[in-house]
Amino acid sequence: MAAFVGVVALIAGGFLFLLFKSPASVPSEMRVTDYAAEMAAGTLQKTSAATAPEPAEKVDLEGEFETFDGKPGHSEANWPNFRGADYSNIVNSAVPLADAWPESGPPQLWEVDLGEGYAGAVVWKGCVYVIDYDPAKEGDALRSFSIDDGKEIWRRFYHAPTKANHGMTRTVPAVNDDYIVSIGPRCHTLCVSRETGDFRWGIDMVADYGTEVPLWYTGQCPLLDGNTVVLAPGGKAFMIGVDCETGEVLWETPNPNGWKMSHSSIIPMTLLGKKTYVYMSVGGVVGVSAEEADRGTLLWETNEWTHSVISPSPIQIDDSRVFLTAGYGAGSMMIQLKEEGGKIVPQPVYQLDKTAFACEQQTPTFYQGHLFSILPKDAAALRGQFVCLDTDGKFVWASGKTNRFGLGPFLLANDRFYLLDDHGELTMCRASLKDYEIMAKAQVLHGHDAWGPMALVDGKLILRDSLKMICLDVSAP
């Protein structure tokens, strides 16, 4: 009888162990994260420098190359990187733009099917480039299309299986006359020759720098400064500069705080008369010298702004002020840089609550001394509305409860905003400092999660939802 009781106790103990034991750890690059659920459960990834990333096996980034029957089109203007030529998300279009649309909306010039994601396009000399994910072959693909008809020109693919987590791709490539650089969902950085797609080099930031893949995969867009690619891997180096021609790492900014990659992107600014790369990491905000004499040198840092999920990028207000914003309860902050004792010191000027001004996914546009953006879903009565704020943090106007845009993108061209809501309805409104004024509306996409950043070149507006990219003619008739 005693033996029988012992066996029963052993079985019961084993059952309880299986029931209550901690789950096996999942490498960061393969995690599928429900942010709200994990926050409630207290299981989000920690931001401590002591948390070592999982080792990763390198991916063959040269991969394979295909050509198709598409030919480069023609474009006078370019859209070379995230938020356009000067990172402002503002276009001064030489091509006049329509003030109204027919009921059917602006004419569609072409459409292309894509793998699930939110990656935006760039345009250079008649070619459209986008980073995509091929679910059948399980890997990333940098693709080139004609801006004239949407026909594919070439594609470079590398095998990097990625589990769907609200889509895969989220980044915008960077391009100049010679090179194009992309970052895939799991931090794989690829550089190829722009015209031919010939492989130049690749960096696996997880394997090479110990980068921890952000919660919903990489959102950081590469920065091309001349022929130097600037990246913020976190891990072993906070920021690095890589030569486009050779792939040689030219400089590295140390990361003593162990700050990590966010979904935000590096933005070049001139602050206090000095060219600076500004980046909002998970841990703090940093300014790194972009001057040739001391490029890569840390100029200033602050941990006054630290949040675990940061998607928007920093916005320059003037020579000394930078505006910071994020979603998930973060709100916003204005910081000002001052020189004290030979050092640059960033100081908070004011903070705004999430219901006053915050941005979950897109980066605000700064225009005529005002900030324009779509407020996040936790902004109470203003959730999803397009709003205008002055630089003192004072609310000017909102689009109203009947005009909500979810997490959709927007851009400004010739004094009018184009806004895309979650479900593909495109709105054109005036860039007014007085009130929200609609000029036109049209349903242009019929999928869901239309979140990818837009691009506008020569009156051609390129936009996407989770599975399709289209090009619209928004020029004046």
Image: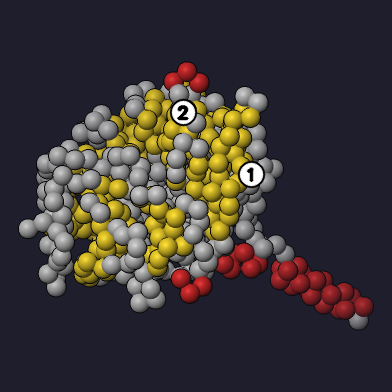
- From the viewer's perspective, tell me whether residue 102 is left or right of residue 279: left
Q: Which residue is mark 1?
A: 303
Mark 2 residue element: loop
Mark 1 residue element: loop
Q: Nearer the viewer, residue 458 or 174?
A: 458
Q: Which residue is mark 2?
A: 273
Q: Quadrant of residue 199?
A: top left
Spot the residue most to the bottom.
1
Which scheme is used to colour this image of the protein? secondary structure
**Measured along the vertical axis of the image, is residue 246 above or below residue 162?**
above
**Measured along the vertical axis of the image, is residue 50 above or below residue 434?**
above
Amino acid on which disc 2 is placed: Gly
Amino acid on which disc 1 is placed: Asn
**Measured along the vertical axis of the image, is residue 270 above or below residue 187?**
above
Mark 2 and mark 1 lie on one chain; the one further toward the N terminus is 2
x, y percent for residue 477 = 7, 58
x, y percent for residue 153 = 17, 43
Residues packed near mark 2 inside 10 Å, few (<14), some (14 to 19) or many (20 plus): few
Q: Residue at coordinates 15% horizontally, 55% vertically from top-left?
A: 97
Q: CA distance from mark 2 to mark 1?
A: 23 Å
Q: Residue at coordinates 35% horizontally, 77% vertically from top-left?
A: 402
Residue 366 seen from this side:
yes
Q: Quadrant of residue 7?
A: bottom right
- From the viewer's perspective, tell me whether residue 43 is left or right of residue 204: right
Q: Residue at coordinates 30% horizontally, 58% vertically from top-left?
A: 431
Look at discs 2 and 1 and give the one toward the viewer.
2
Spot the residue most to the right.
2
Q: Are marks 2 and 1 in contact (CB under 8 Å)?
A: no
Q: Pick the quarter of the image with the N terminus.
A: bottom right
x, y percent for residue 363 = 41, 52
x, y percent for residue 401 = 39, 76
